[in-house]
Amino acid sequence: NKILQEINGYIGMLIGCVAYGSSTSLFLARNEIIAGGASGLAVLINYLNPALTVGLMLLCINLPILLLGIKYQGWKFILRCLLTVATLSLVTDLLAKAPLMTEDTVLASLYGGICQGIGLGLFVRFQFSSGGTELLGRIMRRFVKGLNIPVCVGILDAAIVIVGAIITKNPSNLLHALIVIFLSTKVSELILVGFEKSKLCIIIS
């Protein structure tokens, strides 16, 4: 049973990488939508220097974060992160060679957010992580008292989105990024909790 669970986990991780890579390569990057996270920062660097591919930048950005996270998250978790990041970087660069799906930035934001949400939901469901601001937020929380992980991640993502809008001189990027983040959050939540209308809370005191 444990072997089957592990196999299912890695299959889920691979599907998640394809979904997340599709979001970045087929919808966001080539429409210059900077939507936060390590992928958003990678897209911004690629915008400034097209010779540096998004997948390669994802790997370069995440490696120091993963090394920093070994002390706080443990070797096992970081190794799973490293495998996910390497796979995601490869898939992202491979998908970058596919035809552009749409030049409509609103459609790109919608479908980019949906695909990103599928990827993130599968990562969390099968206990993987793509590193980036999520892992950095976990580390940041240890040094900044009073802030929880979502707030730390939100601060990091907001900074990337704002810097992206300034560098690309495109204020509407803020609106597109909000669409991506909102849909990504909702879709990933849907994958984790399903369509159930009720939730069970067990309080042990």
Image (spheres, rainbow, N blue to C red):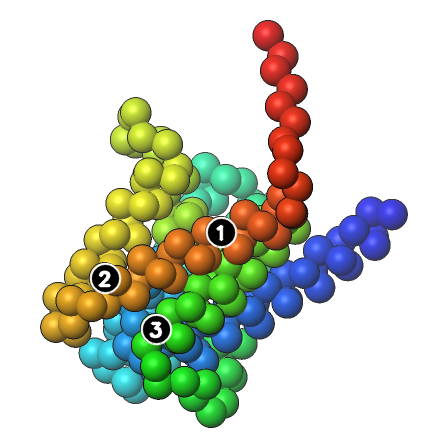
Residue under pointer 3: 106
Q: Nearer the viewer, residue 34 or 8?
A: 34
Gap in Å between the C-alphas at discs 2 and 1? 18 Å
Gap in Å between the C-alphas at discs 3 and 2? 12 Å
Residue 109 location, quadrant:
bottom left
Q: Earlier in the sequence, mark 3 or mark 1?
A: 3
Regarding residue 56, the answer to whether it shows in the image is: no
Camera-side mark, 3 or 2: 3
Residue under pointer 2: 174
Gap in Å between the C-alphas at discs 3 and 1? 17 Å
Q: Say whether marks 3 and 2 touch (CB < 8 Å).
A: no
Residue under pointer 1: 186
Check the image and report above or below for 109 versus 160.
below
- Give the residue type that dot 1 points to: Lys
Q: Residues within 10 Å of mark 3 (few under 14, many from 20)?
A: some
Q: Position of residue 172 (x, y in %)?
A: 20, 68
Q: Residue furthest right?
A: 1
Which residue is found at the position 49% from the left and 64% from the top?
A: 114
Which residue is found at the position 77% from the left and 59% from the top?
A: 7
- Give the residue type that dot 2 points to: Leu
